[in-house]
Image: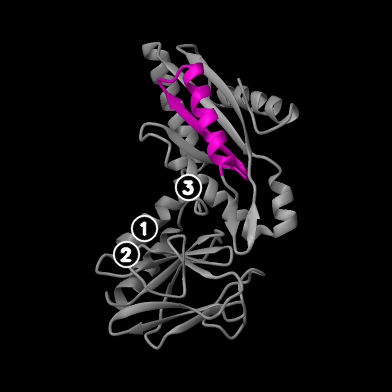
Amino acid sequence: MSSEDPTRTQLLSSFLTKLGDDTGYLVRLYPVTVGEGVVALPRRGTVIGRDAECGIVLEDVDVSRHHASIELREEAYILKDLGSRNGTTVNDRRVTEAPLQSGDRIGIGRGILKFMRGYDVETQYHETIYAMTIQDALTGIPNRRFLMEALRREIVRSHRHRRPLSVAMIDIDHFKKVNDRYGHFTGDAVLRDICGRFRASIRADEVFARYGGEEFVLVLPEATLEQAREMAERLRALASAKPVSVNAAQIPVTVSLGLAFTQGEEVTAEELIARADKKLYDAKTTGRNKVCG
């Protein structure tokens, strides 16, 4: 979603106000479907699944026919898995039954839904829509749009102060084979797992973003090429340290990385990423699971 229709926004505001503050709502974060708004949860409860008779229908082969339910018990909304094949998660933690808090991310099949409730639910909704323009809903990290804006700012700073700036392009090796063998549900889980490992090692002033598909970019302000290599090797080791566990499958993962560096030169964000991408290509064509640059 890039922007909202003003008329639709007014209608949603009226809708949210009319239902009252004690109502729970779901917003679909992933996959993004233009035109979908909020869904109010009925007090009597609802079932989420692939079956057309469900209160909330998710057309996804990885969603069971009757996958999960949400019901109101003693003023708390309770999410319950209904014996689904792929399970139900809350904030990436698999659950059988769990109370929902406003802001929780519910995983059902490949879909991600956000639960909202409270006096400021309209504000929450608009904040969610804004976040969808700069954040990758599947992994929770910044998206390509945010990345390019941040990288342009860092290039300006590097040029003005003659400071080092490094960029790493990261690609998950043989990711198409994972999707082909295990399915997209498992592929999504691999992306989330690897992103989680990397995020724990990245500083607040660094930008780690999803560039597209299985490709990611890490922006390293004040990092020399040697420092960038050290960081890239740490990430490479993290990826291969242990397999990704999805249901009964244990999936070994490796990554390839390409590096680019600048210090004060006039260069565009696109040019710097292209340099890193060329080094990534070198890594992938000379054996994978390595750092080039």
The amino acid type, in three-letter code, at marker 1 is His
Q: What residue is shown with label 1?
A: 126
Task: Examine the rendered structure and indicate whether residue 267 appears above or below residue 74.
Answer: above
Q: Secondary structure at mark 2?
A: helix
The numbered dot on residue 122 is: 2
- Please name the amino acid that badge 2 sits on: Glu
Q: Confirm or deny contact between disc 2 and disc 1 (CB under 8 A).
A: yes
Query: Residue at the location (51% across, 54% down)?
Result: 1
Disc 2 from disc 1: Cα separation: 6 Å
Question: Which x, y percent locates residue 102?
Answer: 33, 66
Q: Residue most toward the left? A: 119
* Alpha carbon separation for disc pair 3 and 2: 30 Å
Q: Which residue is mark 3?
A: 196
Foreground of the two, 168 or 251: 251
What stretch of residues is rendered in magenta? 212-241
How far across and down, in percent of the image, does residue 280 sit? 65, 28
Based on the picture, tell me whether residue 230 belongs to the magenta stretch. Answer: yes
Mark 2, other Cα within 10 Å: few <14 / some 14–19 / many ≥20: some
**Residue drawn at (32%, 77%) of the image:** 23
Look at the numbered disc 1 and give the secondary structure of its residue. Answer: helix
